[in-house]
Image (cartoon, rainbow, N blue to C red):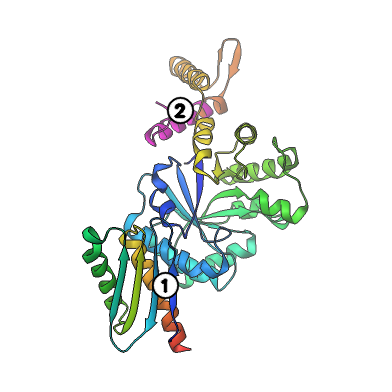
Amino acid sequence: MGKTFVAGTLESSDCLITLSPANTFSLDIDTVVHEAFYEHIKRVIETTLAEENVANVHLRCQDRGALDYTIKARLRTALKKYKEADDG
Amino acid sequence: MARSYLFIPGNVPRMLQNADVFEADALIIDLEDAIAAYEKEEARTLTAEFLRAHRPESVEVYVRINAEDPLFTEDLLSMAPLGIDGVVLPKTTLASLESYRNSLEKHNLDVPVIGLIETPDAFFELLEIARFPSLKGLLLGAEDLSATTGMKRRPGGEELLYCRSRLMLAAKAAGIRAIDTPWTSLDEEALALDIDVANRLGFDGKCAIHPNQVPAINDAFFPSEKELKEARRILKRHEETNSMRFSLDGKMIDKPVVQKAKALLQKAETYRQKGGKP
């Protein structure tokens, strides 16, 4: 098992992002609003990953009704921890 | 101008995104005491993304940053470009304000600051602090002050009278805001007493640590109908006599009273526009 990097919570209006290094990209979204927002959440995550120049990770997003800014913030924090560990 | 300053933790999305419905005149998004050491990075990033996407427009927005490096610099550089109304600087002293100014100048930034006065040392340089450039207000932090001095807070706040008076006078002398410390329990009667003391001493507003405290603060700092009626009568008589010195109901009225009446009506108008009393 590789190391994982976590940000966020499972409280209402938040999301918990769990990220681990991988050789390919994979994404697992667990959301209470799957039908209406799965594609939207996926797009927010993919855009943020592109902005941060990160491609190959395994990423899990456990969503509890988070707005876009929260998903972005939690993902950026997890990515920062991952990059710092990678640099270290 | 603001009556109520509501503290909101910077790491709780449901509080941040609902912040503008609590009817506070100002928000203080907290990156300091409300945030555990291991959550500082998360809170700073969440607050920054929130302000970029959803900065509330109808309220003043301040961010309480951390006082010591590396968090101080990281917080300041993250928040300064986000169009906030200012930062709240914990444990403000002349030395910490110098560091604040140097950091901003180094990065070509300019953000007003509210000095959080919560250490005994600060009270002995309060007027110099109040006159520091970019300082927008002085905020009394009675909880940290109590912890340092052994002062015991009680409803009514006799133990704080000297500190409140000194802070209020320094703020007024410098022409900046005097903001009172929050009352930290949800006891409504004690809160009302604490608000009344701050209001009578001449503070401009007060902090809240819970949205339920906001209406009582807003109501108390809104001028009463009796005060407004009296101010209108003074200004009417001033216009009739075209003088700054006249008598009204047997009382002598002079320039400071006329100016105070004008300021009171202006304050009421500002608060009405913010959605205060009709």
The Cα atoms of the two marked residues, 1 and 2, are separated by 48 Å
Q: Which residues are magenta?
A: B260-278
Residue at position x 35%, y 73% in the image: A60
Residue B64 placed where, x, y %?
A: 52, 58
Q: In the picture, which quadrant includes the C terminus of chain B? A: top left
| B149 inside magenta stretch | no
Residue B271 placed where, x, y %?
A: 43, 34
Above or below residue A5? Residue B23 is above
Residue at position x 72%, y 54% in the image: B147
* Residue at numbered disc 1: A77
* Residue at numbered disc 2: B265
Chain hosting mark 1: A
Is B109 situated left or right of A69 in this image? right
Q: Amino acid at mark 2?
A: Leu
Q: Amino acid at mark 1?
A: Thr
Above or below residue B200? Residue B57 is below
Residue A13 placed where, x, y %?
A: 38, 56
How crowded pointer 2 is (Cα within 10 Å; few <14, some 14-19, many 20+) is rated as some
Q: Given this view, does label 1 or label 2 mark the residue nearer the observer?
A: 1
Q: Nearer the viewer, residue A33 or B10?
A: A33
Q: Are marks 1 and 2 on the same chain?
A: no
Above or below residue B63? Residue B194 is above
Give residue B159's quadrant in the image. Answer: top right
Residue, far right: B150
Q: Secondary structure at mark 2?
A: helix
Residue at position x 33%, y 55% in the image: B54
Q: Secondary structure at mark 1?
A: helix
Q: Nearer the viewer, residue B157 or B84?
A: B157
Give residue A77's quadrant in the image. Answer: bottom left
Chain hosting mark 2: B
Residue B273 placed where, x, y %?
A: 37, 34
| B266 inside magenta stretch | yes
